[in-house]
Image: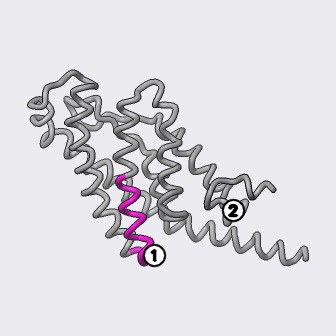
């Protein structure tokens, strides 16, 4: 009865996987409040490490779990900064969907790296396009002012942000995946011993 009430795709997940996903959501939510301005003169462009957790969720559990982590982690920001939250969600989701698609074709380190490289390009392009729509609403800037910020601020910020998230996620993934597999194996062994 409980399994039937779970959202699509969750019925096949073990309780340990569901707990791990919930922890990833909570980690991403907390990290979304750590905002660091990284481009001098463009203090509104802030890096937050929540994208790392969303990418980890994508590599470990698939694109849709990664999207769920990314979107859920930014829900509190929709109240205080709806346009900024929207921009961050779109940038992260575009990165996640590309990484997840490439990685799932052949789950290996090389495809994770290729997915991240392609994801950095797509995420940066999506962010630049959205800046032409959102920045005039957010800051009252003209299109010419936004265009003048693309090369010195918007492009470098988005490339560095997506690249940093990708590098840390790939490095963390190797260790986290082996730890989760080890824990899942220990859980299976203890269940067999009880039978």
Residue 68 on image: x %, y %: 52, 50
Dot 1 alpha-carbon crowd within 10 angstroms: few under 14, some 14 to 19, many 20 or more: few
Q: Secondary structure at mark 1?
A: loop
Which residue sits at x=41%, y=74%? 109
Residue 79 higher or lower than 29, as above or below: above
Q: Is residue 61 left or right of residue 43?
A: right
Report the magenta residues as a range.
94-109
- Tell me, for residue 11, which label it has, or none: 2
User: For residue 179, what is the image quadrant?
Assistant: bottom right
105 falls in the magenta region: yes
Q: CA distance from mark 2 to mark 1?
A: 23 Å
Q: Quadrant of the C terminus?
A: bottom right
Whether residues under marks 2 and 1 lie with C-beta atoms below 8 angstroms apart, the answer is: no
Q: Residue furthest right?
A: 195
Q: Give the labeled residue for mark 1.
A: 107
Query: For residue 17, which quarter of the picture?
Result: bottom right
Quadrant (top left/top right/bottom left/bottom right) for the N terminus: bottom right
Left or right, 146 with respect to 31, comes to left
Which residue is drawn at the image coordinates 56% and 68% (left, top)?
Answer: 177
Q: What element does badge 2 sit on?
A: loop
The residue drawn where x is 52% and y is 45% is 28
What sort of colour scheme is used for the picture?
Answer: one colour
Q: Is residue 48 above or below residue 134?
A: below
On residue 31, the disc is none
């Amino acid at each position: 009865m409980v399994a039937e009430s779970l959202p699509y795709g969750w019925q096949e997940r073990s309780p340990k996987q569901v707990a791990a996903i919930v922890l990833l959501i909570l980690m991403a939510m907390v990290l979304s409040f750590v905002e660091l301005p990284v481009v001098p003169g463009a203090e509104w462009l802030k890096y937050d490490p929540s994208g790392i957790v969303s990418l980890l969720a994508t590599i470990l559990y698939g694109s849709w779990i990664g999207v769920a982590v990314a979107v859920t982690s930014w829900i509190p920001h929709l109240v205080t900064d709806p346009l900024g939250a929207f921009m961050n969600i779109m940038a992260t989701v575009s990165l996640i969907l590309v990484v997840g698609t490439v990685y799932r074709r052949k789950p290996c380190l090389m495809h994770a790296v290729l997915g991240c490289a392609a994801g950095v390009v797509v995420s940066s392009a999506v962010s630049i396009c959205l800046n032409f729509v959102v920045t005039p609403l957010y800051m009252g800037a003209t299109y010419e002012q936004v265009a003048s910020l693309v090369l010195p601020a918007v492009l470098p910020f988005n490339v560095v942000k997506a690249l940093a998230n990708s590098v840390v996620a790939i490095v963390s993934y190797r260790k986290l995946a082996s730890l989760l597999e080890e824990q899942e194996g220990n859980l299976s062994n203890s269940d067999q011993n009880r039978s």
